[in-house]
Image (cartoon, rainbow, N blue to C red):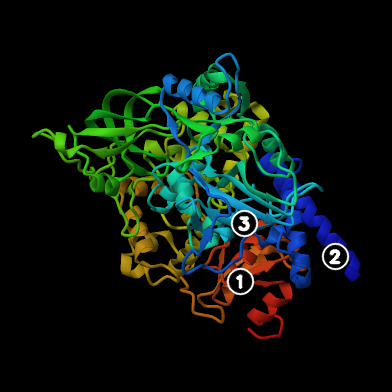
Amino acid sequence: MAVRRVTERAEKLRAEIEHHNYRYYVLDDPEITDAEYDRLFGELVGLETVHPELVTPDSPTQRVGARPLAQFASVSHRAPMLSLNNAFSEEDVAAFDRRVREGLGLDAAESVEYVAEPKFDGLAISLRYEGAIFVQGATRGDGQTGEDVTPNLRTIRSIPLRLRGREVPQTLDVRGEVLIYRSDFQKLNERQRSRGDREFANPRNAAAGSLRQLDSRMTASRPLRFFAYGIGQIIGGPMPALHSDMLDWLALLGLPVCSEREVVKGAKGLLHFYGGMAARRARLGFDIDGVVYKVNSIEQQKRLGFVARAPRFAIAHKFPAEEAQTVVLGIDVQVGRTGALTPVARLAPVFVGGATVTNATLHNEDELRRKDIRIGDAVIVRRAGEVIPEVVRALPEQRPPDARAFRMPAHCPVCGSKVVRLPDEAVTRCSAGLVCAAQRKQAILHFASRRAMDIEGLGDKLVDQLVDRDLLKTPADIYRLDVATLAGLDRMGDKSAQNLIATIDQSRDTTLERFIFALGVRNVGEATARDLARHFGSLDRLTKADEEEVQEVKDVGPVVAMSIRQFFSEPHNLAVIRQLRSAGVRWPEHAGTPRQPGALAAKTFVLTGTLPSMAREEARELIESAGGKVSGSVSRKTDYLVAGADPGSKHDRALELGITILDEAGLLALTGAGTGKQ
């Protein structure tokens, strides 16, 4: 491809990718699939890798990649980022409107036009654009000086790296808020729980902590969003006459602006907007803690000016507190679908955040101990929108003499099996993943998944029906299903039932590594299951091995060995395994062949895309025969990414982390397969 054609293609790809970022992250109206987006991104990455001279500061590929900082630099704001005075009642709002009218020399019969907007519960930031390019971003700090968090802000895909349109000012300082949507926050905490990491208290804390990471790669892994709501400085371009026009103009430049805004008149209009937002608050995708009123005319704003550290032309009308005091009547334990035991406070009913709350999460045993919450304590409860209510803190000064400390049970409250807590986790879990009713659906879906027993057709909705009708209690019950039973379920007919039974019958013949993976042992993924199968050769040898023997397996440390030993020491799990074998589930066994270190010992590979002349399984076997390990996802522990055609997002992630990328020829050379060496 000629240099000119390459340059033109790269420019077109950058524009197209940013267009789709705008459609997805700003308008919430994507035009293409994720796969097509990944294809475009992968093509641009490939061009810029081969032609690094084409890389531009505003390229979508440059959102992540800066080295971790030692500390944040200070930034002096060109225009101060001031706080707003607060209103808490209708009288406060009426007084604000009166002060505005008096300041503008208007009489009581004349109405002032305002813009009313949500008050985001996030982190205020400024974005500086020069020549349409994003060059710097900073936190509010003390209003005069903030922290330079430019690398982290570049990772937020709703923030454009280049402004859209032709009439872009020479310099533009945009003010706005970084936040996390509630649905994204719940997924983030689910991920934290699954890793045994501490959960975030609320979306605002998560957003603030994510934006202040010294390593921008960590920020990139967090689901941050941005809304623009003002301008701090503009050079080389006209300032719109109205605040409402300014918001519309920012949206035309490609900056996300909240659609929940209105132009209203007088105190009556302000209060009407406040009431509407309070009613809609729980249905919003993000947290707000009030609304903001601003005089719409920019000229009138200038006339009103400022008092102390706040503008006279704007005010924040705060919602009532979403915290309330109540009493802990008891502490129950809930068992989640992954076996995690979560202490939950039973509360004296209290109205908070627009709803009556009777239960609140205590997260985990460590958090409960840290907060020193006891049964009988007076406590403060917080509820924000649709986020699960939580106990914020106890009030020890009101503690009754008979208050009792909580103890995590030694046995699962659902199935009675032993509970375990691994050294590197904050979460206590039930050890009987195959029989615990709380984990039943998850265990069965994992058992039937493609990389486990590969029972195609046994998906979420069907498993829901089978479990809810008490037809499946453990994975062993899958092999007791018949056509008549299945045909009687919703969206199932005789043909579908016959096909599923045939697939179930086929799954009886499997491999030891697939079966081990299908059991869902904590911390045992595909690679570890494969290593266990090769090392022990038979399931009986594995089930009888102690922790020291298990640690002889490649890449198995004390924590994984403990998980394996605890799983196979649980009688309920062994009973299900016996039932599965009695149902005809079988696999070839051998004497065991512990793997010897090879040329790629301790090296981790990830495969992506289509290789020219070998299947993915062939590449896997080639790597493992040389002592390497193949993982399914790219992380900081990855040593090499082997990329073929259409590599997708893994290629992007590898570039972000600075991981060595190999093609098929590079893999063959590294393993020695391309030189005749073994």
Q: Quadrant of the N terminus?
A: bottom right
Q: Earlier in the sequence, mark 2 or mark 1?
A: 2
**Which tag is nearer the camera, tag 3 or tag 2?**
3
SS category of the residue bearing label 3: helix
Mark 3 closeness class: few <14, some 14–19, many ≥20 residues within 10 Å: many
Amino acid bearing label 2: Thr
Q: Quadrant of the C terminus?
A: bottom right
Amino acid bearing label 1: Tyr
Examine the rendered structure and indicate whether residue 437 appears above or below residue 508.
above
The residue pinned by badge 2 equals 7
Q: Residue at x 41, y 26 (%)?
A: 88
Residue 432 seen in render: yes
The residue pinned by badge 1 equals 640
**Residue 337 coordinates in the image, percent (x, y):** 42, 40
**Which tag is nearer the camera, tag 3 or tag 1?**
3
Q: Earlier in the sequence, mark 3 or mark 1?
A: 3
SS category of the residue bearing label 1: strand
Instruction: Give 244 or 477, whichever is nearer the viewer.
Output: 244
Amino acid bearing label 3: Arg
Examine the rendered structure and indicate whether residue 215 appears above or below residue 465.
below
The residue pinned by badge 3 equals 154
Examine the rendered structure and indicate whether residue 245 appears above or below residue 607.
above
Instruction: Give 393 or 95, whichever is nearer the viewer.
Output: 95
Instruction: Give 465 or 534, whichever is nearer the viewer.
Output: 465
Examine the rendered structure and indicate whether residue 393 appears above or below residue 294.
below
Q: Looking at the rendering, which quadrant does residue 621 occupy?
A: bottom right
